[in-house]
Amino acid sequence: MEGSYLFSKRLNLQKNLIYFGFLGIFLFFAITLYNDGFLTTRNLTNIVLQTAPATIMAIGLVFVLSSGEIDLSFGSIVAVSALTTALVLQSAPLIMGIMAGLGAGLAIGFFNGILVAYLRLPSFLVTLATMGLFAGIARSMTNLRSIPVLNDTFTGIFGSGKLFSIPSLVIWTILAVLIGHIVYRHTRFGAHILAVGDNARAAQVSGISVARVRLYALTLCGGLAGLAGMLYAGRLQAAKYTLGESDLMTVIAAVIVGGTALYGGKGSIIGALFGSLMMGMLNNGLILMGLDVSDQMIVRGVIILLAVALSLRNFNRI
Amino acid sequence: MTEFQPVLSLRGIHKAFDGLVAIQNFSLDLFSSKIVALVGDNGAGKSTIIKVISGIYPPTSGEILLEGEMVNFSNASSSRSRGIEVVHQDLALVDEQPVYMNMFLGKELTKTPFGLLDKARMRQESQNLVDGLDVRIPSTNLAIRNLSGGQRQGIAIARAVHWASKLILLDEPTAALGVAETAKVEELVSSLRERKLAILLISHSLDQVFRLADQICVLRRGEQIGIRETCKTNKNEIISMITGVD
């Protein structure tokens, strides 16, 4: 019994691809960039700090993809949430700013969710539209201006602070991954997300409210994007409409490479963390290598393509 | 007295969709430990009967009595809460999830204090269930997609047995199976009599119907042609009832 279980695990080499890829890229940069400071504690910490918002977004996306839907709007949610928080903090206390930023994310996610779950519009098109809609709203909110965040407590909690000499962004990442993983793997909500994404009809005849599960998944993704927006605002001590704009491709790639199925039914929070760290490492390494921006984009595109191809290649599919 | 009370009685069931008659004047009694087969050509109304019993379609007129008590199921959940389970033709299993999660799909067990899934107990109970029904699978940790067609059917039936206290509706349980697997599933269905459950079986295979059923109920174009004791009829009679040709 134990033996056959292990056997089925071993068959799933593809599932563990992310860990080999992560290790491979790490070793490659560690050797080639040894003299350029890649391996220093400071640089490695920097990678984790820079990827924290993307990791948080990736966790939300794992839930949405696992439920068989997709969210393309999380980048715009990041900008709207960051700007909302910054604007509210100008005249209101800390707690109001936090609630406004998180609330904005949850509200947009809920809006996506209602359209997808109850009006049964395809999530690809709904979130493509809301991506544009809220990118526009983010621009018009402040007439393209960037809004400074001067509340020290806020920037401490969400960006530059430390607790027991651990940077707050690292704590946020650990907390989000840990809670995300437990909810995904060890709660009925997580189980229902996976069931709906795998076989919605089976879930429905088993008494699972398919619409509610989809609604919650998209709302959760919006809320996490809101949190990511606040982390950006806290770290940069300012909010701008460009925040989150360039994260769409990176986060989707991180999640897919991390072993989450594009069409629902299976995924991994830990995999998404490593996917996100791998993307951050790639960014960092290519900069240290001295590639200019256009070359960085090309190399990153090729590597993402390769990684996605390897992790999605299904040898049984016609 | 209760020995002879039917688990489920359908009386004068009539079902029409926008004026189109799907079922007319259908009456049937199902008893515990008895298997009744529902046969008929495609479109005869077999699936409609299953959906009426399981609460997906409310009947246009007629009565459904569960252990003598009139019931009115508004959806599939309300029939399930009264001990009626359906094994759908497509099995309604979640491929990527392990056997034990499928066994408890939608009714997952949790443990205190945080309400997290009690995977150990679900594994254990699933193992007991498949052992008790002699469904042979390597492990309840395996994902459904790693199982054969017969094993999947076994899991779907085991799940129904776990949750049904009165009646199981089986929709074409062996339609997609090979010879050996069909024999195994038939053995399993037959063993359900010992669990005091009433069984309604839909099947296209008359050989199978004669092997398994105690009674055979024939439908033709929504009309109930008749009910026969399996031991007092033969294939020719049933075929002529199904086709309407003597």
Image: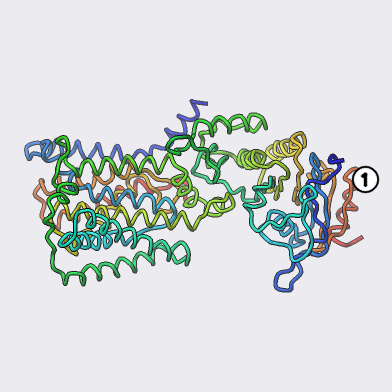
Badge 1 local density, few (<14 within 10 Å), some, or many (20+)?
few
B93 in relation to A209, above or below: above
Q: Is residue A115 above or below residue A94?
A: below
Q: Secondary structure at mark 1?
A: helix
Q: Quadrant of residue A40?
A: top left
> As rendered, which of A220 and A126 lies closer to the eye?
A220
Q: Is residue A246 visible?
A: no
Rendered position, B141 above or below A251? above
Instruction: Pick out the residue farthest to the left.
Output: A35
Horizontally, is A124 left or right of B88 in the view?
Answer: left
| Residue B81 as seen in the image, left or right of residue B66 | left
Residue at coordinates 45% horizontally, 29% vertically from top-left?
A6
**Residue A85 lies in quadrant:** bottom left
How many circles with numbers are drawn on the protein?
Answer: 1
A106 lies left or right of B96: left
Type of the residue with mark 1 = Lys
Question: Horizontal and vertical percent for residue A82?
Answer: 21, 59
Q: Residue at x 29, y 49 (%)?
A: A254
Residue A226 screen position, x and y as percent: 27, 56
Q: Is residue B37 visible?
A: yes
Which residue is located at x 68 percent, y 61 percent?
B57
Q: Name the one closer to the observer, A169 or B133.
A: A169
Q: Chain of mark 1?
A: B
Q: Most extreme residue toward the bottom, as rendered?
A: B19
Check disc 1 and report the residue beneath it. Answer: B232
Residue B220 position in % (x across, y down): 82, 61
- The residue located at (16%, 72%) in the rendering is A143
Q: How is the image coloured?
A: rainbow
